[in-house]
Amino acid sequence: MPVAEPVTRQRAERLEARTTRENKNLCQRAAELEGRTLSDFVVNSAVEAAKRSIRETELLALTVRDRTAFVTALLGSAPAPNARLRKAAERHQQILG
């Protein structure tokens, strides 16, 4: 759900975009349905899309980094088998062949 910027924050920066008449009319209609100005609707929609894009990209990067760390930890730092494990492996070999 879009969240409007706090009223106390001054809007001093500008964004400009060229679009088709159809896209402008579509955004204008959506803005009217939400009881907002076209500028407010477009800016808030862009901000929400930007936040979502950043969040998804960061999640993807985190996932790759975590997967790499997990595999490295699994493969790279396995301790040598202790006497109990070796004995169990021998028993397994004797029983199952």
Image: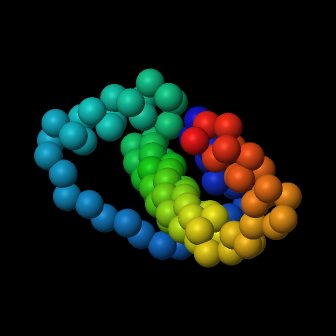
Residue 66 on image: x %, y %: 60, 64
The answer to whether residue 22 shows anywhere in this view is yes
Q: Name above or below for residue 69 compared with residue 93.
A: below
The answer to whether residue 58 shows anywhere in this view is no
Q: Along the line of sight, which residue is nearer the eye, 69 or 10?
A: 69
Q: Along the line of sight, which residue is nearer the eye, 39 or 62?
A: 62
Residue at figure coordinates x 73%, y 72% from the top left = 80
Residue at figure coordinates x 57%, y 64% from the top left = 71
Q: Quadrant of the C terminus?
A: top right
Residue 32 on image: x %, y %: 42, 29
Residue at figure coordinates x 51%, y 30% from the top left = 35
- How are the residues colored? rainbow
Q: Is residue 46 left or right of residue 1?
A: left
Residue 86: quadrant of the picture: bottom right
Q: Is residue 81 left or right of residue 22?
A: right
Residue at figure coordinates x 74%, y 72% from the top left = 79
Residue 28 on image: x %, y %: 33, 36
Q: Quadrant of the N terminus?
A: top right
